[in-house]
Image: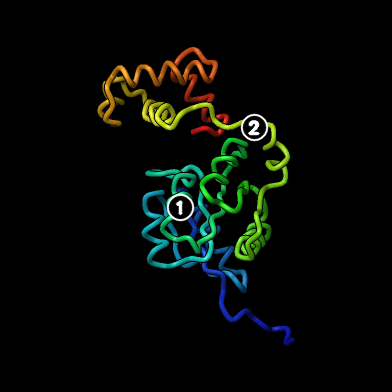
Amino acid sequence: MPQDYRPVRSVRVLLAEDQGMTRGALALLLGMEPDIEVVAQAGAGDEIVAAALTHRPDVALLDVELPGRSGLDVAADLREECPDCRVLILTTSGRPGYLRRAMEAGAVGFLVKDGPVEELAEAVRRALRGETVIDPALAASAPSAGPSPLTGREADVLKASVDGATVADIAGRLRLSESAVRNCLSAAIGKTGTRNRMEAVREARQQGWL
């Protein structure tokens, strides 16, 4: 085979990262790989599905923390809207709870962003081949992480309280009664073993439940 051989078709990649400089650098570095083409970029979670439907990527690289909607939430949407697109989740914090949620959402890989770009490029290739790609250190710690004790509604209420919103604000935002919001907050505080809702938010985030 000639040394200058190139694949007939590159792996088409969608890259979602809210930090513009990081996103640009990753796109540039991945684009230097002979068999990878970054066909779409997104800076917010609510832009991803539309971009995927337009550009039909083979692999989507999604950051966990995105404005609008998280990469974990969007992974589930892509499973429904673009079932042929394989999802890899990228994060700066390898929390076992995030790994569990990513797998439940249909992602085929979970990687921390501090690794070399060569490993990320190889993860893209492996995902396209149908392999599951998980950061080794995170995979080792994952068995000790149990599922989130929070119900979906309790998690939503905690998320809505992150910015210091009042019970009335949360109730209006989520279309719940104020008593339902108070009950959810009380349950979440009890399940996280904390003293107030801000501590509950902090603990749930630390565990990767939000």
Q: Residue drawn 50% across and 64% down?
A: 84
Task: Say what secondary structure mark 2 lies in.
Answer: loop
Question: How many numbered markers are drawn?
Answer: 2
Residue occupied by mark 1: 20
For disc 1, the neighbor class at 10 Å (few under 14, some 14 to 19, many from 20) is few
First along the sequence among labels 1 and 2:
1
Tell me, what colour scheme is on the image?
rainbow
**28 over 171 or under it: above or below:** below
Nearest the viewer among 152 and 2 is 152
Mark on residue 145?
2
Residue 169 position within the rendered picture, expressed as x and y whole percent measured from the top left? 27, 25
**153 over 198 or under it: above or below:** below
**197 over 70 or under it: above or below:** above
Q: Residue drawn 42% across and 62% down?
A: 52
Residue 36 position within the rendered picture, expressed as x and y whole percent measured from the top left? 58, 69
**83 over 141 or under it: above or below:** below
Tell me the amino acid under the disc marked 2: Ala
For disc 2, the neighbor class at 10 Å (few under 14, some 14 to 19, many from 20) is some
Q: Residue 154 lies in what quarter of the image?
A: top left
Q: Left of 47 or right of it: where is 191?
A: right
Q: Residue 104 lies in what quarter of the image?
A: top right
Q: Residue drawn 57% across and 30% down?
A: 207
Q: Residue drawn 56% across and 54% down?
A: 88
Q: Quadrant of the N terminus?
A: bottom right
Residue 109 position within the rendered picture, expressed as x and y whole percent measured from the top left? 61, 52
